[in-house]
Amino acid sequence: MNTPDRKKESVWDYPRPPRIDPSTETVEVWFGGLQVAASTATVRVLETSHPPTYYFPPTDVREDLLQPVAGSSFCEWKGPASYFDLIVESHTARRAVWCYPRPTQPFTAIAGWYAFYPALMERCVVDGYEIQAQEGDFYGGWITPNLVGPFKGAPGTRGW
């Protein structure tokens, strides 16, 4: 990604409640030496103080590598989330992928789409740039060179 040509985005300009932002960037996820997702039709969910989370259409994800797991979480904006282990041969990333099977009305565009915790992946790439994962184990934001923080997720930021 050629950062000088990209407009800087401050995560503090992102809205609350979050907004869905369609993206034509080339977005890739790698795990266990295998490309497990690749798309030019993702959406980014943008929320104040958070790096974007990329959601992939199911057709662009290796669903055969996903194993549903028990338990869920609840987002005040999107509703209940389901989780999956990602299994590539002898490599397993536990609860590393999630989706909203039946999200709330404003987020129906991401129903059944998958998001990946980048910190649990081998690499996540946006337009050729290997991203930095958002700190912490609760959020799944992707930090690209055009983003300006500070970012929620680091110790002491959970209550922001």
Image: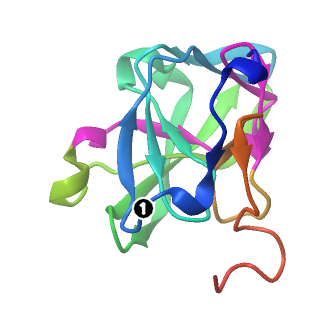
Nearer-the-camera pick, 82 or 143: 143
Visible residue check, residue 25? yes
Specify the quadrant of the image occupied by residue 125: top right
* Magenta segment: 109-133
Assign the C terminus to one quadrant of the image: bottom right
Residue placed under numbered mark 1 in the picture: 15
> Would residue 87 be found to the left or right of residue 122 on screen?
left
Foreground residue, 4 or 157? 4
Identity of the residue drawn at 57% across and 14% down? 26
Q: Quadrant of the N terminus?
A: top right
Q: Quadrant of residue 37?
A: top right
Question: What secondary structure is marked by label 1?
Answer: loop
Is 92 in front, or is 27? 27
> Which image quarter: residue 77?
bottom left
Residue 110 in the magenta stretch? The answer is yes
Residue sitting at 36 percent across and 52 percent down?
19
**Residue 35's spot in the image, x, y percent?**
67, 14
Quick one: label 1, few (<14), some, or many (20+) residues within 10 Å? Answer: few
Please tell me which residue is depicted at 80% across the width and 27% down the height of the picture.
Answer: 90
Taking 12 as reference, is 58 left or right?
left
Pinpoint residue 122: horizontal percent, then vertical percent: 82, 29
The location of residue 63, given as percent across then percent down, is 46, 24
Residue 117 visible, this orientation:
no
* Tally of marks: 1
Task: Give me the residue at 62% from left, 31% from top.
Answer: 7
Q: Is residue 109 above or below residue 13?
A: above
Residue 103: % across, % down: 25, 56
